[in-house]
Each structure stands twice: as structure tokens, then as C-alpha cells.
Image: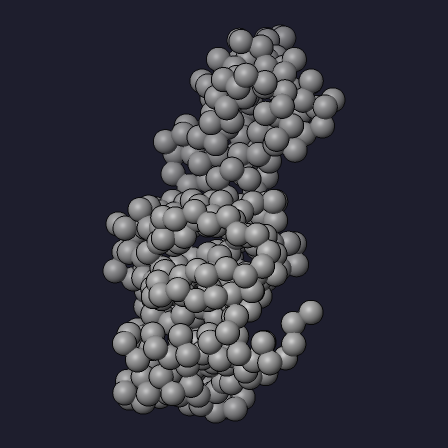
Amino acid sequence: MYDQEKIDNSLSFLKNRFKEYYEKNKIVLPYRFGKREFAFIFFKGKGMYRHLSFTRKKNIDRFVIDKSPAHAYYSTAYYQKPDAPTMQEKKWMGAELIFDLDSDHLPNAEKLSYEQQLKLVKIEFIKLVEDFLMKDFGFEEQFIDLYFSGGRGYHCHVNDPKILNLDSNERREIVDYITGRDIIDSYVFHDETTTKTTIGNRTFASGKTLKMPSPDEPGWKGRISKGIIDIVEEIINNDNPKQKLKQYGVSDKTADKLLKDFSDDRIKRIKQGKLDQTSTIRRFFLNNALRKTAVSMVSGETDEPVTCDVKRLIRLPGSLHGKTGFKVVNTPIDTLKNFEPLNDAVVLPNDMVKIDLKEKTNIKIKNEEYALEEGIHEIPTYLAVYLIGGRKALIEL
């Protein structure tokens, strides 16, 4: 059990390292910062210190250097009186459209390492930006700002004038579209007559197939078709197709039935856009193509996405994340794919300090692998801040 003095020394260590950083590096102020609310959490404080506004850049620069906060935020909304103590008094004027993708939103995230989580959440983030915001919604690159959060994910700010006055319900509709909520099979698939039978003066459809859209079709229809074809390829090219099916969450019984239904002729027909009428195949493909192509934006059914909140606080670009010491970094679209958080967002110095590690830790940071056992270690400052900020270690004086 650590004593209070050791905890206080560790918090002072973090604050001093942050202060040194802010003395040499400036935060990036958002557009129309004078109309934004600012908020901070301090290393030795309790709760959030908010309802602040700044009319001059030099004032906020001085505040951040003097206070050296653990976390720095600003409002995605514009207000007539951003420093008013209540939301009603602030007088809302509009808000950016914000998307906050965090590794918490990934399925089975707790089983992944920090590095694995960051890689997977970036894939989801690129999908969100390129496939949905730019392609489906048509937002122009000039109105999209992207940031690594400094923690476990990424933030996307859309500041297109067309969306600034959308209310929460309208923003929720955007989220529902991106997550594929309420898409039903009749929207994507349709029956196509294959044979007809004539009796007397009337002709009836005697044979049908379930037809899916072309993969080139825009929006969700083409997206689901591409997802279905990808799933088929994954299954039939796998050394253990049944195990691959089980990775999609199906039971042994359903996996056996699907494999039985996956005849060579049926696979060929699926690639041609023809799904047979078996309810098992229809349900399996729609559900899993949705999961594969939609964006994971919430961690549970009751989790309200950040996007719907018109009064949200978001991390200040250029600031440091109090739990990692990593920088909130602007990641333009053309550099996002090559962005490496555990290298590019690590900005604190590499001078060596001693820590008392509470638990075994493995991490690759600044291109160097660390496998640390519990106990005393001498490590670079940037790694010490990450471990102390994450409550895995304390400073050893």
C-alpha cells in the first residue's frame, strides 16, 4: 500500500512535467475561441473547473502554463456568454458535429492490448471519415478536423456551416445511419422471379431468388453487398471454416447448417448477387455484413454517442492527456493511415527517472519494447508519465 506522500510526489512530478511542456509548446485554439466555454481538471483538484472563457490567446496560454492542468477541454458549441454559470444563460448559438471513437466501443476490447486497441480503433475511424462522412454525406475535407485524443481513440470535428444548428434529434439520425441502426433485410434485398407458370389467363411466379444490390451501388445497399462478398471469401478460404463462422458469433448448430448450405453452386450464386431463400443465410449475412461495415460508436445499448450532444466538451488540440502524457494531435486525412500514436503523440522528454511499478507491464513505445516486472525501474520520462498517469506506478525519489 502506497503512502499519501508518495502519491503527492507523483502528482507533483506529473504537474511539473506538464508545466515544462506547456512552457515550450502552445495549445491550438479552436475557431472562434472567444465564443467557447473552457474547462479543466487539475492533478490535485477535485472535479472539473469549468464555465471559463478567454478573449485573448495570451490569456489562455498563461493560464495553462500557470495551472498545468491534467486535462484541458473546450465546448464544441458556440455561446453568446460562454462563461455564464448555466447552459440557459450561456445562450447556445450552434455546435460542431463531433464524433468520438474510443477503444471502449470495440467488441472484446478488454481482451486486447493497448497497442491492438489503437490499431483497431483507427481502422474504424478511417471507415467513419472516408466511407460515411466524405462519401455518403459529402462533407468536404476543408470542414473536417481529425485528432488523436491522447488516450484510446480519435475525435472528428465537422464544422460545415450546414450542420452547426442541427439539434440533438437530427444529429442522432446521422448516428443511426452510420451505425446501421434499424436497417432491415427488405431495404437491402428484394425478390427476383426466376421462373413463371401460366394457368389459364394468369401468370404466377413459380420460382424466386433473393437478389442483393450491386457492390458498386452507393450507400448502405452497396456497402452490405461488399460486406457479404468479403464474408463469403473469408469463410471459404479459411483452413477451418467452421471456426471462422463461430468467430462471427454463431452456434455450433448454426455453423453446421450454414456450411451445409454453402455448396459451390450457392457460393457462386452469392457472388453473382443471388441469395437463396433460406432464412438462416439471409439473417446471418445481413447481421454480419452490418457489423462488418457499420462504425462502432457506442459501448452499449444505452450509451449515448457524443455526436448527439450539442453542448459537449472535447479535448483541446495540442494539450496533454492526464492519464497518458500523450499529445492531442491533429491527424489530417492524408496522414492518418500512417499515424502511429505510440510514436507520433509521445512528446515528453526521454531523460531517465525512477518509478515503483505496481503491476507487470508490456508496451512498445517510441519504437522500443518494454517488458517490466513489478518493482523499481529506471525508465524514460514519457514512459514514467504514462505509467503514473494510468495509476500503474508512482515516482521513486
The residue positioned 58% from the left and 76% from the top of the image is 6
**Where does the image place residue 99, in percent across and percent down from the top left?**
45, 60
Figure check: 94 above or below 235: below
Q: Quadrant of residue 187?
A: top right
Query: Which of the pair 105/338 is nearer the observer?
Result: 338
Figure check: 167 above or below 296: below
Q: Quadrant of residue 351?
A: bottom left
The residue positioned 50% from the left and 24% from the top of the image is 234
Which residue reaches farthest right? 253
**Where does the image place residue 394, in percent across and percent down from the top left?**
55, 69
The residue positioned 36% from the left and 31% from the top of the image is 216
Figure check: 88 above or below 289: below
The residue positioned 31% from the left and 84% from the top of the image is 61
Query: In this view of the protein, can residue 112 be seen by the observer?
Result: yes
Query: Which of the pair 379/133 is nearer the observer?
Result: 379
Q: Quadrant of residue 200?
A: top right
Quadrant for the N terminus, please.
bottom right
Q: Is residue 205 left or right of residue 66?
A: right
Query: In this view of the protein, can residue 202 be seen by the observer?
Result: no
**Where does the image place residue 67, in percent across and percent down from the top left?**
42, 85
Q: Is residue 33 left or right of residue 83?
A: left
